[in-house]
Every structure is written in C-alpha cells, then in structure tokens.
Amino acid sequence: MPTKRIFFKHSKTWRKINEYGKNFINIVIKLNQKTSIFMKNLILGLLLFTSGTLLAQDSLPDIALETLDGQSTSLVKEASQSPLTIISLWATWCVPCIKELDAISEIYTDWQEETNVSLIAVSIDDARTVRRVRPMINGKGWDYNILLDTNNDVKRALGAATVPLTVLVKNGQIIYRHSGYAPGAELELYEQILANAE
C-alpha cells in the first residue's frame, strides 16, 4: 500500500533507522584495516537487530490506564472495542492538542456513522494538572473515551517526543501515526480512516 510506505518513510522509526545506518557507516569508515572481520560483522549484526526491534514496535502497547471515574483498564482493551480506533495523546496545557480535538469533535459523529471509528483521548497530564481534565472535557463537550496516563507510560511506549500524537489502530496494529497539529490535519487522518475502514 503506497500510503503506508510514504508514511513509514517519514516516521520517527524510519529516522532512527537512518540515523543508525549513518552511524554504522561512520563507524566502519573509522575502523582501520586491521579491524577483524568478526568485529565488522558484530557491528552489522547489532545494527540489524536494533533496526528489527524498532520495526517490531508497530503493535499497540498494552498499558494499564485509568478512566475519568478511576476505573482500571488497558489501552489494548479499550482499542479492541472498535474495528478502527484513533488514539490521541493530549494534555490540558497543550494548545495544539486542544485545537486538534476540537476540530475532530466537529466532525466526529459523521466519522462514526460512516466508518464506525472510535476515538480514545489519552491525557498525559501529570498528578499536578490531571484535576483539570474533567472540567475541560465537560466544558468542551467532547464525546470521546477519555483515559488518564499520569505517568506518561503511553507516551514513552509510543516514542512520542511531544504531543499531540495521533495514531490509528486496526486489529491491535498501529497503521498510521501523526505528530503535531496544523489546521487540516484531521482531513489527512480521515483519509487514512476511509482507506482502512471495513
């Protein structure tokens, strides 16, 4: 599928693999001729192993989270309730996060009717700011499944450098990832939803 390939080339994982590859080439160049073939093969093997590990992170991590009501749940359990799930990492202090969730909120009902997609908004607010989540949700009227990740476990597991981070999950696999928000990004997300809806 060309969309996956184009997306993969721009993903953080691809950048890491490129970075490792460049580092490997620099190491090989710097090694003098007396370096054994064993060492060169060892370095190459480590590079391939690391790349394989990075590529294997396309599965949605099974992380324990809390609902707004304090109930324990897991990200995988919540995502498995819909054939296609958007997971948005956000915080009350993140203006682009709020803009993205507001933009999606305006068209979310249509998306649900057309594609049966669901959205899980995972707040990464820490213990000091998590008390702001419920009032913000109530004030915005967002009709999303809200989960709390006060330890940033999901953010770390997904390798998110910053928020907002939006991922699209199908059958427990991350099939699309987008970091940051600019007006219109929700339309790109919707294209991905339509391409993967059953």
Image (cartoon, rainbow, N blue to C red):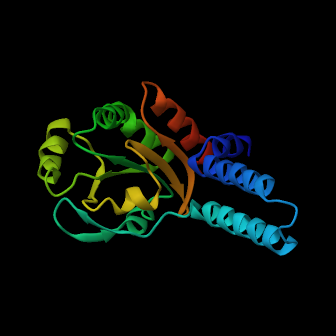
Point 24% across, 59% down: residue: 150
User: In the picture provided, is 11 more to the left or to the right than 161?
Assistant: right
Q: Position of residue 2 (x, y in %)?
A: 74, 41
Along the line of sight, the residue nearer the viewer: 156 or 25 = 25
Along the line of sight, the residue nearer the viewer: 181 or 76 = 181
Image quadrant in which you'd find residue 126: bottom left
Q: Position of residue 34 (x, y in %)?
A: 86, 66
Along the line of sight, the residue nearer the viewer: 128 or 185 = 128
Point 74% across, 46% down: residue: 1
Q: Position of residue 100 (x, y in %)?
A: 36, 34
Q: Position of residue 101 (x, y in %)?
A: 33, 37
Image quadrant in which you'd find residue 39: bottom right
Along the line of sight, the residue nearer the viewer: 107 or 44 = 44
Q: Is residue 189 above or below residue 133?
A: above
Q: Residue furthest top?
A: 183
Q: How many marks?
A: 0
Point 74% across, 51% down: residue: 26
Image quadrant in which you'd find residue 71: bottom left
User: In the picture provided, is 31 more to the left or to the right than 169?
Assistant: right
User: In the picture provided, is 22 more to the left or to the right than 119?
Assistant: right
Point 25% across, 41% down: residue: 142
Q: Is residue 97 above or below residue 20?
A: above
User: In the picture provided, is 174 more to the left or to the right than 89?
Assistant: right
